[in-house]
Amino acid sequence: MDISLQIKSLLNEAELYRAQGLFPEAKDKYHAASAMIHKIDKLKNKDSLLKAISGKIQSLEKKTEKVETGPTSPELSEKGQNLIKSLFGENDLQKAVALAKFGQFERAITELEALLKDDVYRVDAGKNIIRCKMAIASVDDAIDQYHQWLSGDLFTGHQLESIRAYLQPIIDRKGIDKSLPVPVGERDEINAADSGGIEFSMPEPEEEILDITSIGITFTSGTFKGKMVEFDVNFQSGGMLSLIISKNDKTLIDELKNGDSLDDIQFYSPIAMFKGTAVVANKTQINSGPKQGDFCLDLKIKST
Amino acid sequence: MAIFNLKKREIECKVVYYGPGRCGKTTNLEYVFKSYKKQVTGEMVSINTEGDRTLFFDFLPIGLGKIKGCDIRVQLYTVPGQVKYSSTRKLVLRGVDGIVFVADSLEVRREKNMISLKDLQSNLKEYGKSIFKVPLIMQYNKRDLADEGIPLMSIEQMERDLNRQLKVPSFPGSAMKGTGVGVTLKACLMETLKSLQREFKWAK
């Protein structure tokens, strides 16, 4: 093919790709045309042709940059957000979460905050608020939010612990050296006692037990007989310890049954190490959330 | 996942137009909206576009009327094609009942077609679905550009590239001109309804 026809064909292709929004492809063709023009010595208007192509390439580069650096989830109109809610969520929580998934974090937070009033949705709404805060602000904002809830009375201790158990691994994974305070006690019980309603006979106050950070269980029977396995304590309420055990350690957790007595436990606290015994109070598999499939093991300390 | 209301004898299903960026998914939906007024039951919504690129999704509700005593309603969606909108694509694909894969016939887009089809397979897999089992139709779009002297892949080459293993129904098309848009959608709806019939036995 005649070289001028080749150039014309390349420019034609480039123009069509540009019109189709295929900017990199258009740019390649303009570059190819430009290289071909450079090789021709006696071409009329050579300089002005090259200048025009260069201008086209620059314009394409600007457009490409705009596409590539543009926000992936710009804020939508209320109508657009309402459509997302109606198409991608069935209940109020799903609707709010759908907004977050489409990057509409501000509106999602507003809707999730309203759901905090609903006991059914409170914990999930809280976790999703944390998620939104991390997406639009920072982990520090999420931590501040946790502290704010900790100092208020909206959540029960148990609910707040669920949020702490969700947030703490995220903080750890990000390499941030911050430990979220574990909520103390269950506020529901305190509120019930203060409300002037039915009164139950109160158990004898328990002997004060130190904060225990981890324990080492030495198995006295079964496959792991004689071995000591260490676990972190995820939650402590008085003499009740909750441990989250990975599903990968299923063979180990299978050895432990409700009511089993563990007679050789090493307790580790920030100020002391001591030996004692405990009973397996409860063993459940976590059905949802980031720890899904893992096990929650509750141990009741018998003696220290 | 289609919603089957046994009491009202209503089925609502979801068809998603998938494919690489700029392949013509939105143009397909726009043509359906303009040309099938009787079936269209609501406005076509294009949620926020940058220039004319889809950033979120397009949505168009249509109704097929009563088929075997059941009222069939279909939600048509497009996904954003650009690679960076991967999470949005996955969200829109959730609960899909039928898929139209719009491939770009331009030779320079050969690799993008294959990447997008791979992406579809991987997203379906994450929802526990197999690309070999989901109702899927191929459309080889932009065939009209051959008239402009632009290098296009042959249909045979596109079949080899994209449909060698899948062996799903495929149609040449030009969404800009409307060619092949109706026949593609019709084939997809038929495959989708056949699949829903196997699942719900609604036409008994």
Image: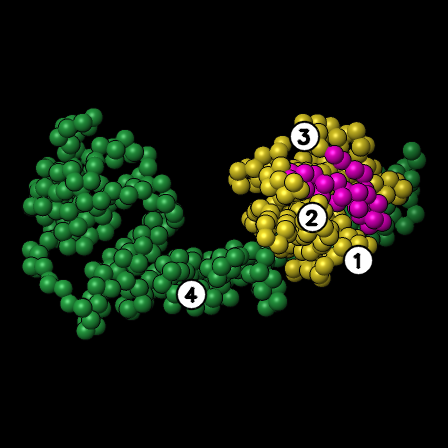
- Chain shown green: that is A
Please determine if labels 1 and 4 lie on a single subunit: no
Q: Which mark is residue B37?
A: 1
Q: Which residue occupies 40% across, 57% down?
A: A124
Mark 4 belongs to which amino acid?
Leu
Of pointers 3 and 1, the one earlier in the residue sequence? 1
> Would you identify the image quadrant in which residue A200 lies?
bottom left
Q: Chain of mark 2?
A: B
Tell me the chain of label 4. Answer: A
Q: Which chain is yellow?
A: B
Q: Which residue is mark 4?
A: A115
Asked whether the residues under the numbered discs 3 and 1 touch, taking CB atoms below 8 Å apart as contact, a structural biologist would say: no
> Is residue B58 visible to us here?
no
Q: Residues within 10 Å of mark 1 (few under 14, many from 20)?
A: few
Marks 3/1: CA distance? 33 Å
Is A304 on the left-hand or right-hand side of B168?
A: left
Amino acid type at circle 1 is Lys
Residue denoted by label 3: B166
What numbered label is drawn on residue A302?
none
Give yes or no for contact between labels 4 and 3 (Cβ–Cβ under 8 Å).
Answer: no
What residue span does the magenta drawing correspond to? B169-197
How far is disc 2 from disc 3 in space, using C-alphas?
Answer: 32 Å
Q: Is residue B196 magenta?
A: yes
Residue positioned 67% across, 27% down in the render: B165
**How would you rate the neighbour count of disc 3 (Cα within 10 Å): few for under 14, some for 14-19, many for 20 or more?**
some
The answer to which of marks 1 and 2 sits earlier in the sequence is 1
Discs 3 and 1 share one subunit: yes
**Residue indicated by mark 2:** B69
Q: Spatial distance from mark 1 to mark 2, Cα to Cα? A: 22 Å
| Marks 2/4: CA–CA distance | 41 Å
